[in-house]
Amino acid sequence: GAGVSQSPSNKVTEKGKDVELRCDPISGHTALYWYRQSLGQGLEFLIYFQGNSAPDKSGLPSDRFSAERTGGSVSTLTIQRTQQEDSAVYLCASSMAGVYSYEQYFGPGTRLTVT
Amino acid sequence: RKEVEQDPGPFNVPEGATVAFNCTYSNSASQSFFWYRQDCRKEPKLLMSVYSSGNEDGRFTAQLNRASQYISLLIRDSKLSDSATYLCVVSSNSNSGYALNFGKGTSLLVTP
């Protein structure tokens, strides 16, 4: 079956511009997670959705970052007024949620470069 | 202090060797434990979950010691295709769902 997909795969933007990253989770997966991986760093949790709601936004690095999820499916991560330190690979993962079904499956990521 | 710590390596081993990776975690409330594998410029992929009783999947054996907050991964009969970064991952149920906490990874290079 289809896995998690993300678009675009690569994005180069100028400092100060806004960007929007998209994630299509595996069909039927109710939980969706955004992470980012900066060069030489481990993966960092950003935000979690259960259905369309995001109980915890504390992982977002600043108020320039926001995310939404509609219809319990597609999610978008928006970064406003991008800065060079936002350059990273942004990864989306989805899972069935529930006690024993929380294995997360990752999309291929969006590589963001802010120049 | 980082929540999940791993030796970054690199571990350079010949084909056929046995290699072990270790990981420690700081949150005693962690409930779920995994090893993920990440190839260069690719997304992480689940290698195996780690259970308290220890578990084995082919050439891979994972162990969990909750008292010491320590996780291990043993790879026997290493293959060239095992070359990758191995990520130790822990999770607990919180307001962040089952958000994963990743170690920075241990790099493995298997040579002919």
Image (spheres, rainbow, N blue to C red):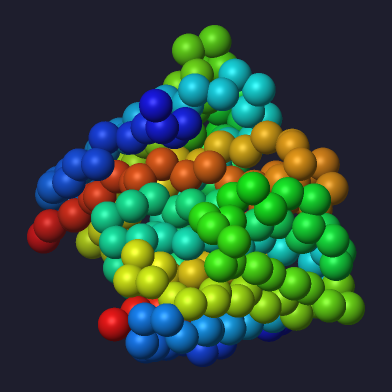
Is residue B87 among the parts visible in the rendering?
A: yes
- Quarter of the picture containing the C terminus of chain A is bottom left
Please tell me how many numbered marks the rendered image carries: 0
Nearer to us in this view, A107 or B78? A107
Q: Position of residue A35 (x, y in %)?
A: 54, 60
- Quarter of the picture containing the N terminus of chain A is bottom right
- The residue under the point 56% across, 37% down is B90
- In the rendered image, which quarter is residue A83 located in? bottom left
In the image, residue A19 above or below residue B20: below
Left or right: A102, with B62 as reference point: right
Q: Residue furthest top?
A: B67
Left or right: A24, with A86 as reference point: right
Nearer to us in this view, A20 or B52? A20
- The residue under the point 54% across, 10% down is B67
- The residue under the point 41% across, 32% down is B2
Q: Position of residue A73 (x, y in %)?
A: 81, 76
- The residue under the point 80% across, 51% down is A55
Is residue B53 among the parts visible in the rendering?
A: no
Q: Position of residue B59 (x, y in %)?
A: 41, 45
In the image, residue A34 above or below residue B62: below
- In the rendered image, which quarter is residue B84 located in? bottom left
- In the rendered image, which quarter is residue A25 located in? bottom right
Left or right: B7, with A54 as reference point: left
In the image, residue A59 above or below residue A21: above
Nearer to us in this view, B9 or A72? A72
Q: Position of residue A74 (x, y in %)?
A: 75, 80
